[in-house]
Image: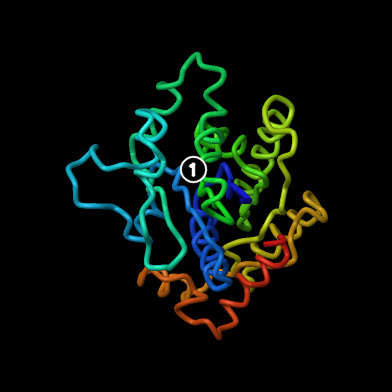
């Protein structure tokens, strides 16, 4: 089982879309995939319509797994994609730092929980929140590798730098084997001058860490997502679907 965290301090850079569409590529290959929604905004959960109809606070989700020690198996839900399952997010993740205040071992909790799923899945993809709180640290400690989406925006570039600063701490103290898969240009509108400027800034700053595959800002992705489908399933023969196949190949999935 390979666990990958998709993260950037800046929101709106395509973390959820990339997680969702990489799951689509792995589904296409008949891989067993577990998605973890660690973002309190729960966008990945919403995309996959994974919320149930029980009363608020009673449904099993990642917050209940972490806070109340509900078994992970109780929180795993099916999706429209055969072989792709999800542990839903929850707004209670906003309390994560307070819940574990003073517990230096809390960063290891998610890794310990996922160990029990090691033989059930080929991949775990973790959609991280747009901040570097304990939930992101837990994800990085649990991960074998991480991927940073970066938009053509100075705040997104700075967010990527901050993630790498956090990774240095995580590697030193908790997960020395954590590997960077790359920094992927995302939500790119190529005809804009400002986009070209920040793409050049990214190339100079990140060097060969910046991936060759560029995920463009295209309406087809949004149309497919609104139907709860990754682009590889909604429009499998499209050039847009091939973008995510190319990304998966470049990062070694």
Task: Give the percent coordinates (x, y) of residue 8.
Answer: 58, 45
Task: Give the percent coordinates (x, y) of residue 30.
Answer: 54, 70
Is 235 on the left-hand or right-hand side of 122?
left
Q: How is the image coloured?
A: rainbow
Say which residue appears at 20% left-offset and 41% top-offset. 56
| Quadrant of the image occupied by residue 164 | top right
Say which residue appears at 52% left-offset and 63% top-offset. 23
Task: Give the percent coordinates (x, y) of residue 50.
Answer: 33, 56
- Please state, as top left, top right, bottom left or bottom right, where the C terminus lies in the image: bottom right
User: How many marks are shown on the rendered structure?
Assistant: 1
* Outermost residue to the front: 119
Between 143 and 12, the one nearer to me in the picture: 143
Say which residue appears at 40% left-offset and 74% top-offset. 223
Q: Secondary structure at mark 1?
A: loop
Residue corresponding to mark 1: 129
* Outermost residue to the bottom: 237
| Quadrant of the image occupied by residue 160 | top right
Between 97 and 8, the one nearer to me in the picture: 97
* Outermost residue to the left: 55
Binning the other alpha carbons within 10 Å of mark 1 as few (below 14), some (14 to 19) or many (20 upward) gives: many
Is 122 on the left-hand or right-hand side of 221?
right
Residue 198 to residue 244: above or below: above
């Amino acid at each position: 089982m390979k666990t990958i965290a998709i993260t950037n301090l800046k929101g709106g850079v395509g973390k959820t879309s990339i997680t969702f569409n990489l799951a689509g590529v792995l589904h296409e290959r008949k891989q067993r995939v577990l998605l973890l929604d660690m973002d309190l905004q729960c966008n990945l959960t919403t995309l996959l319509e994974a919320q149930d109809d029980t009363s608020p606070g009673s449904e099993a989700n990642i917050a209940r797994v972490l806070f109340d020690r509900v078994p992970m198996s109780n929180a795993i839900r099916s999706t429209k994609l055969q072989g792709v399952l999800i542990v839903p997010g929850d707004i209670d993740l906003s309390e994560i730092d307070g819940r574990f205040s003073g517990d230096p071992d809390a960063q290891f909790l998610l890794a310990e929980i996922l160990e029990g799923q090691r033989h059930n899945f080929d991949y775990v993809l973790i959609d991280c929140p747009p901040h570097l709180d304990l939930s992101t640290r837990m994800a990085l400690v649990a991960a074998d590798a991480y991927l940073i989406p970066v938009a053509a925006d100075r705040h997104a570039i700075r967010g990527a730098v901050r993630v790498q600063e956090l990774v240095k701490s995580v590697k030193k103290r908790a997960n020395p084997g954590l590997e960077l898969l790359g920094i992927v240009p995302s939500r790119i509108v190529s005809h804009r001058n400002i986009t070209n400027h920040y793409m050049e800034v990214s190339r100079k700053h990140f060097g060969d860490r910046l991936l060759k595959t560029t995920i463009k800002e295209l309406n087809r992705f949004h149309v497919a997502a609104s139907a709860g489908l990754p682009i590889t399933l909604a429009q499998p023969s499209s050039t847009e679907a091939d973008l995510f196949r190319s990304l998966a190949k470049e990062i070694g999935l």
